[in-house]
Amino acid sequence: MGGFLVTGSASGMGEQVANRLRADGHEVIGVDVADGADVVADLATREGRSAAILAIRERSGGVLDGAVMAAGVGAIRGRERLTVEVNVLGATALLEALRPQLAAADKAKVVVFGSNSTTSTPFVPRRVVSLLERGETERAARWIGRLGALSAPVAYAASKLAVSRWVRRAAVTREWAGAGIRMNLIAPGPVLTPLLRAQLASGSGRHVRSYPVPALEYGTPERLADWVMTMLSPAADFMVGSVVTVDGGTEALLRPTAWPARLPVRGVPRMLRLLREAPRRGQVADYSDI
Ligand code: NAI
């Protein structure tokens, strides 16, 4: 059977990508909490995620050609727990459970929505990110709750940092890249969707508006979908664990030297260990025919 999973398919960028895939003749399994999706499920709860996984497995017939994890909740005060549940576990729990279906396809492509808020939001406690990386959303939300006015932007940035790190760590392993799956991140800046409009109208609207955008315009779901479609195409056959930033220049303006960054001397021992372990981890290609 095959086909593509798209979460957050009822609105914004997820909806745009689902429409494009369908227009190109692909089967799409759209998942959203909103009515009208192929699979209506609340990715903020364990039960909702389990129900979604079962339904996707059944509809896919055991094979997924790709997955776009676009379901997300923006930085809105009072919705911090929801934000971390959907933005982190709404992507990672589904991908972990559906990895066999992705591995069953020929070079399946996965695109996870990160954000440029990962690298441009100040005062994100390390502890919150590491709790989220371990999937401890309840404890992370308690920490975030103590941050007062910063809680909404921190919840959002920390959730996107955690999911981005999960993607980059998992993408290169034998279970993902080694099994033929190409998993990458897209990191948009402000894109005019219902999520951004709600955020601009909320208490954190001032924070969002304060960020300079050198392109002097916000992104659109159509242009972002162009990038996602490329990341789902054979153009991404050699793309693994990459972060594609599409943000009108905010990141480059604020952190011009943060990336690419030279390898610091203290990073050398870890790098040597990874080089030594690469063959055992199945991370060395067979170049014998060159
Ligand atoms: P959107 O609000 O238009 O669409 C998000 C979709 O996710 C909605 O259909 C919503 O119903 C669904 N969703 C939310 N909570 C859910 C839940 N509990 N269970 C299932 N589905 C749920 O948002 P947009 O802007 O298209 O966002 C797509 C992704 O891009 C999100 O992950 C967002 O964090 C990310 N992003 C958006 C930016 C923007 O400026 N719009 C900037 C950077 C990243």
Image: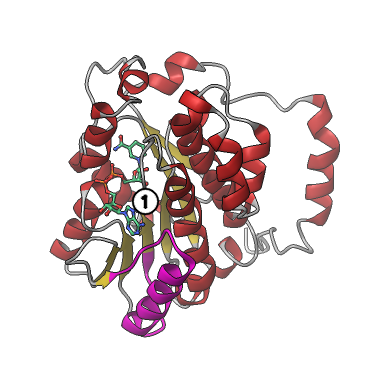
The residue at label 1 has a CB less than 8 Å from ligand 1? no
The outermost residue toward the left is 23
Residue under numbered circle 1 = 231
Up/down of 128 relative to 248, above or below: below
Residue depicted at 36% across the width and 45% down the height: 73
Q: On the rendered structure, is 8 left or right of 265?
A: left
Q: On the rendered structure, is 254 left or right of 1?
A: right
| Residue 123 screen position, x and y as percent | 57, 23
Name the image quarter holding the C terminus.
bottom right
| Residue 144 screen position, x and y as percent | 56, 36
Q: Nearer the viewer, residue 272 or 143?
A: 143
Q: Residues within 10 Å of mark 1 (few under 14, many from 20)?
A: many
User: Which of the 4 image quadrants contains residue 7?
Assistant: bottom left
| Residue 76 screen position, x and y as percent | 36, 36
150 magenta-colored: no
Q: Nearer the viewer, residue 278 or 80?
A: 80
Residue depicted at 48% across the width and 53% down the height: 85
User: Which of the 4 image quadrants contains residue 105?
Assistant: bottom left
Up/down of 228 relative to 182, above or below: above
Name the image quarter holding the N terminus.
bottom left
| Residue 92 screen position, x and y as percent | 51, 59
Q: Is residue 238 visible?
A: no
Range of the magenta residues?
Answer: 40-66
58 magenta-colored: yes
Residue depicted at 72% across the width and 28% down the height: 263
Callout 1 secondary element: helix
Q: Is residue 209 visible?
A: yes
Residue depicted at 21% across the width and 51% down the height: 11
Q: Which of 253 and 208 is in front in this view?
A: 208
Q: Label 1 sits on what residue type?
A: Met
Q: How many marks?
A: 1
